[in-house]
Image (cartoon, grey):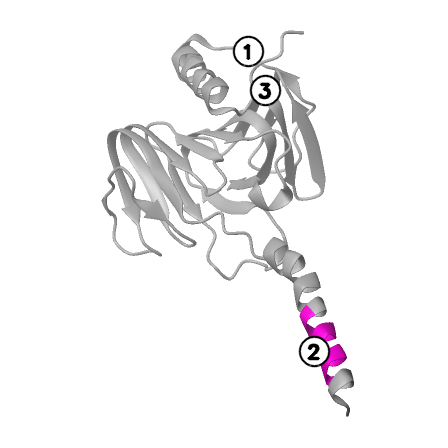
């Protein structure tokens, strides 16, 4: 092989490597660790199913880690700035690091409580948030929405602005602003309903909507 042929072959390898780099980067999103950005009250965290320990501001959670609020509120931010805000007595666990390497949302499981998910508008797929709560899978596509787990095992999803997709075994629903969906413990949910701002949740919703406006997640659009 001549020197010129060797140079051409080397150039081909370098070009192929740079061409594959965007695909590799897209297939391995680095949204975790997520960091505790605000903490009001008492919370605990668990490292990959280890015993629960007291959580502190700026603690980081990686794949397989969990966090729960005992009282008060807690905000987690992913690397791209998507927010998970936990109400009192709420627990979430991030999916273990054996998740698929193809581009996919940040996955977590919710174990009770009230969770507000805020995702920047027009965010790419690897930065979206996917929450598994009981029989439902909620994928936040942008904006702000709440997920509440009821004592009877049902799940209430409410969209305050933006949109989410809710799916389960054999069914899927798309929700936008001012829509809610009650997912029963077993079977498919009925049609979407209109958001009713309950007095008991008014302060929680108001605080989160203010956080969304300031954080750039979008805001309610008056119809």
Q: Which residue is mark 2?
A: 10
SS category of the residue bearing label 2? helix
Report the side of 67 relative to 185 (left or right): left
Dividing the picture into quarters, in which one does residue 221 lie?
Answer: top right
Residue at the disc numbered 1: 196
The magenta-colored residue range is: 6-14
Q: Position of residue 87 (x, y in %)?
A: 37, 27
Counting other residues with Cα less than 10 Å from the Cα at mark 1, is it few (<14), some (14-19), or many (20 or more)? few
- The residue mark sitting in front, 3 or 1, is 3
Instruction: Tell me which corner region of the image, top left, top right, bottom left or bottom right, holds residue 68.
Output: top left
7 inside magenta stretch: yes
Q: Residue at x 61, y 57 (%)?
A: 27
Residues tagged 3 and 2 counted as in contact (Cβ below 8 A):
no
* Pointer 3 residue: 161
Question: What distance separates the C-alpha of mark 3 from that of mark 2?
Answer: 52 Å
Which residue is drawn at the image coordinates 40% and 52% (left, top)?
62
Q: Quadrant of the C terminus?
A: top right
Q: Nearer the viewer, mark 3 or mark 2?
A: 2
Q: Residue at point 73% right, 84% down?
A: 6
Locate residue 182, reporting x and y percent. Answer: 58, 26
């Amino acid at each position: 092989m001549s020197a010129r042929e060797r140079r051409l072959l080397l150039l081909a390898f370098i070009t192929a490597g740079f061409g594959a780099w965007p695909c590799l980067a897209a297939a391995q999103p680095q949204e975790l660790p997520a960091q505790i950005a605000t903490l009001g009250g008492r919370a605990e965290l668990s490292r990959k199913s280890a015993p629960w320990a007291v959580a502190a501001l700026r603690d980081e959670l990686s794949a397989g880690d969990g966090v729960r609020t005992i009282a008060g509120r807690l905000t987690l931010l992913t690397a791209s700035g998507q927010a998970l805000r936990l109400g009192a007595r709420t627990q979430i666990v991030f999916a273990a690091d054996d998740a698929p390497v193809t581009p996919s949302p940040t996955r977590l499981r919710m174990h009770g409580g009230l969770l507000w998910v805020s995702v920047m508008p027009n965010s790419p797929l690897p930065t979206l948030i996917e929450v598994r709560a009981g029989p439902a899978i909620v994928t936040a596509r942008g904006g702000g929405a709440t997920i509440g787990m009821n004592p009877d095992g049902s799940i209430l999803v409410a969209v305050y602005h933006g949109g989410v997709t809710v799916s389960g075994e054999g069914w899927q629903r798309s929700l936008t602003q001012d829509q809610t969906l009650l997912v029963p413990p077993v079977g498919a949910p009925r049609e979407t309903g209109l958001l009713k701002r309950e007095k008991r949740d008014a302060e929680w919703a108001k605080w989160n909507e203010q956080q969304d406006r300031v954080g750039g997640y979008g805001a309610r659009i008056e119809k």
